[in-house]
Amino acid sequence: MKLILAHNNKIALSIVLLLAIGILSTYFNWGAISVIASVLLPVLFFLNTIIVIYAFRQRKYLYLFSTMAFLLCYNFFYQISLDDENHKNTISLLTYNVRSFANEDAKVANNIIKFIDSINPDILLLQESAYKVGRNIKGYDYHFLGFRKDIEKTLLDVYSKFPIVEKGYVDFPNTRNNTLYTDLVVENDTLRVYNVHLQSFALTSRAVLDVSEKLSYTFSKQIEQSKAVKAHANKSNRKVIISGDFNATQFSIPYKTLSHGLNDSFFAKGNGLGTTYNLSGFPLRLDYILLNKSLEVTNHKNFDLNLSDHKPILIEFKIPKTSRS
């Protein structure tokens, strides 16, 4: 019996230590370890929850440390929210990585456009767009199609029912990924909206060392890129919305960098896990809408739409009268 208890204690302690290391790794650039930890933290948390039950039975309260640390450090990843039924005077924003309209497949492209038409958002942000398809999206008086001749960047598009008074790029060096921004005149205010596509994890090798190096390289690029976007946004005197495909979970440094001082629409009004990407069936949240804290999120919806490798997100928000300039 003592051997069984000793074995169980070792397993429990190992799981507690793994979560503790995982939490620490999301605050430091530990390369591949930080990337893997940011993906597995919810699993480690659930395992530690089981350890909590075991700890109470065995009166070994030290095992509670990592679980309490997790709850103190993070918003819980599973949300239950009630949507605001009052849709009056709200602004809708849809973000979607369309994967070049599934590599410009005519049927998929047509279905994506039908989906967009059915939602008819006030602001539409597309990542990994395709110019030939994207220019056929109708219903928007204003748009910023990020195509630039002889510059090889993944295409980002912004479509708006509100006037665009300023626009530009936050280019990342030595990569196809980038970010663009638009200043939109909405009611009596001007919002700066960033359409973000951070460095992608393109893992082509199966060798452990190659994968580890690729994860570490990509993660470092994401940190560099997120800092560039945040620095650009901090220079603006506009109310900022940062949205798009971060290719990083909510437990990662890039997400923490971009979300600092902003509200995450999922934590405000989301439900469930907020999955926007499935990694071989493992649910991940890689796409986000982060808003200035003066903007009131009234609804957040994730769509289980299998037309791209990412899922679209729709939110509705309000500009409070007291914050309008």
Image (cartoon, rainbow, N blue to C red):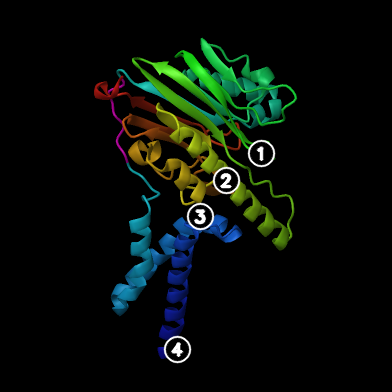
**Quadrant of the rendered structure where residue 100 is?**
top right
Q: Position of residue 234 (x, y in %)?
A: 44, 35
> Which-is-in-front pick, marks 1 and 4?
1
Q: Pointers 4 and 3 in contact (CB under 8 A)?
A: no
Question: Which residue is farthest front?
Answer: 235
Marker disc for residue 224? 2
Read off the residue under disc 1.
173
**Quadrant of the rendered structure where residue 268 is?**
top left
Q: Position of residue 276 (x, y in %)?
A: 51, 40
Q: CA distance from mark 1 to mark 3?
A: 25 Å
Indicate left or right for 309 with 322 as reference.
right
> Which-is-in-front pick, marks 2 and 3?
2
Q: Pointers 1 and 3 in contact (CB under 8 A)?
A: no
| Residue 184 is a magenta residue | no
User: Which span of residues is magenta-colored?
Assistant: 81-87
Residue appearing at x 59%, y 22% in the figure = 111
Residue type at numbered disc 3: Ser
Label 2 sits on a secondary structure element that is: helix
First along the sequence among labels 1 and 3: 3
Q: CA distance from mark 2 to mark 3?
A: 17 Å
Say which of 268 and 8 sits in front.
268
Quadrant for the C terminus, please.
Answer: top left
> Which-is-in-front pick, marks 4 and 3?
3
Q: CA distance from mark 1 to mark 2?
A: 10 Å
Read off the residue under disc 4.
3
> Which-is-in-front pick, marks 4 and 2?
2
Residue type at numbered disc 1: Pro
